[in-house]
Image (spheres, helix red, strand yellow):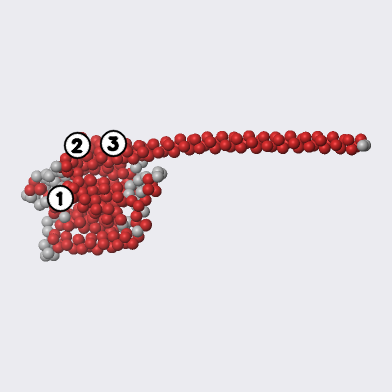
Amino acid sequence: MSAPDIDDSEDNLRNSGTTSNAVAIDVFDDAGEEERNNEKEGNNNGNNKKEDNHQKRWHMFSSCWYAFVTICYWFYRSQAPSMFTPDIFYVRLQDAVALLFVVSFAFTRKASYLVYAINPVRNCLMVALQEAIPSLQHKKVGPEFYRNIASALTQLSCAMLIYYLVKPQPIGTGTLLQEKLHCMGTDFEDKRASAKKAVTFLLTLTGLITVVLALQKQSRDFTDFDIENHGWKILFSLALGAGEEVTWRDVYMADNNNSIQAFTWGVNHVVAGVGMSNPWLYGLVSGGYAFTLGITDHRVARCLHHAAVEYFVIDNLIKPAGHDTWLAESVRRLSSAFL
C-alpha cells in the first residue's frame, strides 16, 4: 500500500470521528433542549394551574359577596319608607349602606352595585334639593308630585350614567357558569327571535290600550281632560317608567341575566312594595312582569308599557288630599312578608 493511501485512510478516520462527535453533540443538544422545553412547559402548566385556581377562588368569593350584598340591599329596601306619601325625603342612618355598595363596585367593577346605591344616593340629592327649594317641603299634593318627579328623574339620570360609563359583567363571565347558564342569559332573545318579536308586539299593543284606558279614567270618560294635576300625572308616569326600565332592564339585566333581574325585582317588591295587600302575590306578579319585559330588547316598547301601567295606577300611588292613604303613611317592612 502506498503512502498516499495511508494518509487518505487516516483523513477518513479523522473525518468520521469528527462527524460522529458532531452528531453526538447535536443529539445531546437536542435532548437537552427538549428537556428544557419540557421543564418550561411543566412550569407554565403549574403557573396556569395556580392562576386557574386563583381565578376560581376569586369568582367564588365574588359570587358569594354579590349574594350577600344583594341580601343587604333587600333588607335596606324593606326598611325604607314609601316614596308615595306626603312626607318629604330625608336621610337615615340606613342610607350609609351606600358606602358598602360603592366600595363593592370599586373592587369588582360590577355595575349592579351602583344600581343598589341609587336609592340612598337619591335620598341625599333630594334632601339637598329640598333645602335649596323650600316649597318642596310642603305636605301638599302638588309638592308631592314635584318631589316624586324629581326623584324619578334622579334615578333615570343615575341609571343612564351607569349605562354609558360602566361596562356590564354578565353573570358567570369568565367561568364555567357562563356556558351552563346560557339558557338564562341575555342571549335568550337571539335564540328565540320569534318569541322576542311576539313579546314586543304584545307589549306595544297592550301599552297603547292601557294608555287609552288610563286616559278614559283620568278624563272622566273623555269629558274633562283639564283635571287637577293631570299633566303632572303624565310626566310622573313617563319619568318613573323610563327610570325603572333603564335601571333594571338596561343596566341591571345586562350585568346579570333576565332571570336574575326578574327575581331581584320581584323580591324588591315583596319587601318594599305597597301595590297589593299580599306581598308574596305582588312579588310574583312583579317578577313575572319584569321577566316579560326583559325578553325584548326594544327599549321604547318597554318604557311605553311601563309608563302606561304607571299612568293607569297613578291614583293608587298618589292619593288626593284627605284620602286615608295620603294622611297615614303605610310602609311595608321585611317582617310583614313572613306574617
Q: Quadrant of the C terminus?
A: top left
Q: Residue at x 25, y 37 (%)?
A: 97
**Res 246 seen here:** no
Q: Which residue is mark 1?
A: 276
Q: Pinpoint residue 7: horizontal percent, then vertical percent.
A: 87, 35
Q: Residue at x 21, y 42 (%)?
A: 77
Relative vertical location of residue 68 with respect to residue 275 in this rendering, above or below: above
Q: Dot 2: what SS?
A: loop
Q: Are discs 3 and 1 less than 8 Å apart at CB?
A: no
Residue 11 is marked as none
Q: Quadrant of residue 130?
A: top left
User: Which amino acid is tagged 3?
Assistant: Leu
Q: Which residue is mark 2?
A: 92
Q: Which residue is mark 3?
A: 100
Whole-angstrom CA distance, mark 3 to mark 1, is 31 Å
Q: Quadrant of residue 295?
A: bottom left
- Lower position in the chain sequence, tag 1 or tag 2: 2
Which mark's residue is nearer the viewer, 3 or 1?
A: 1
Whole-angstrom CA distance, mark 2 to mark 3, is 15 Å
Q: Pinpoint residue 16: horizontal percent, then vertical percent.
A: 78, 37
User: Seen in the image, is 137 located left or right of residue 244?
Assistant: left
User: Seen in the image, is 76 located left or right of residue 217?
Assistant: right
Q: Residues within 10 Å of mark 2 (few under 14, many from 20)?
A: few
Which mark's residue is nearer the viewer, 1 or 2?
A: 1
- Lower position in the chain sequence, tag 2 or tag 3: 2
Comparing 214 with 131, the one in front is: 214
Q: Pinpoint residue 337: horizontal percent, then vertical percent.
A: 17, 43
Q: Pinpoint residue 66: horizontal percent, then vertical percent.
A: 31, 40
Q: Residue furthest front?
A: 1
Q: Residue at x 25, y 38 (%)?
A: 72
Q: Residue at x 14, y 46 (%)?
A: 85
Q: Are discs 1 and 2 less than 8 Å apart at CB?
A: no
